[in-house]
Amino acid sequence: MGVIRPATPGALDRLGRAASRDDRELDAALANLGVLPPVDLDPIRACLNMTEIRLVAELNRDGHRLITVTGGDRVLAWIHHDGRVVMADHQLLSA
């Protein structure tokens, strides 16, 4: 895998907005951040449509993109590079 370019605030904002738009736009926003869009986008949409969230782009220890979804001062979920969504209580929403 090549080097993932830094995630800009604009790219994270685009991802948040894309959750309420069509699949193509959400796919493009995810891919732009280094996340492989899954076939079923519903778990990602559900995660991104939670109220009062903030998105933080990080890299995991293998160098893959990880989007951390926070609400207030706590982590709510992680969107992994392969499109998996894991809630902070470790409930897997997608594979």
Image (spheres, rainbow, N blue to C red):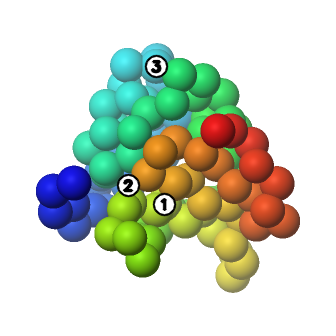
Please state if 14 lies on the left or on the right of 56 as rendered: left
Closest to the observer, 45 or 3: 3
Cα distance in 3D space between marks 1 and 3: 18 Å
Label 2 SS: helix
Cα distance in 3D space between marks 1 and 2: 9 Å
Mark in front: 1 vs 2: 1
Q: Which residue is mark 1?
A: 67
Cα distance in 3D space between marks 3 and 2: 16 Å
Number of other residues with Cα within 10 Å of mark 2, as a class: few under 14, some 14 to 19, many 20 or more: many
Tell which residue pokes out farthest to the bottom in this image: 73
Whichever of callouts 1 and 2 sits on the residue coming sooner in the sequence is 2
Q: Which residue is mark 3?
A: 23
Residue 61: image quadrant is bottom left
Whichever of callouts 3 and 2 sits on the residue coming sooner in the sequence is 2
Q: Which residue is mark 2?
A: 12
What amino acid type should be assigned to the residue bearing mark 1?
A: Ile
The image quadrant where one finds the N terminus is bottom left
The image quadrant where one finds the C terminus is top right
Please state if 76 lies on the left or on the right of 38 as rendered: right
Please state if 52 lies on the left or on the right of 80 as rendered: right
Residue 66's spot in the image, x, y percent?
Answer: 46, 62
Q: Are marks 3 and 2 in contact (CB under 8 Å)?
A: no
Number of other residues with Cα within 10 Å of mark 1, as a class: few under 14, some 14 to 19, many 20 or more: many
Residue 30: image quadrant is top left
Q: Are marks 1 and 2 in contact (CB under 8 Å)?
A: yes
Would you place residue 94 above or below residue 80 in this image?
above
Residue 14's spot in the image, x, y percent?
Answer: 36, 44
Residue that appears at 37% across and 19% down: 24
Number of other residues with Cα within 10 Å of mark 3, as a class: few under 14, some 14 to 19, many 20 or more: some
Residue that appears at 31% across and 50% down: 34
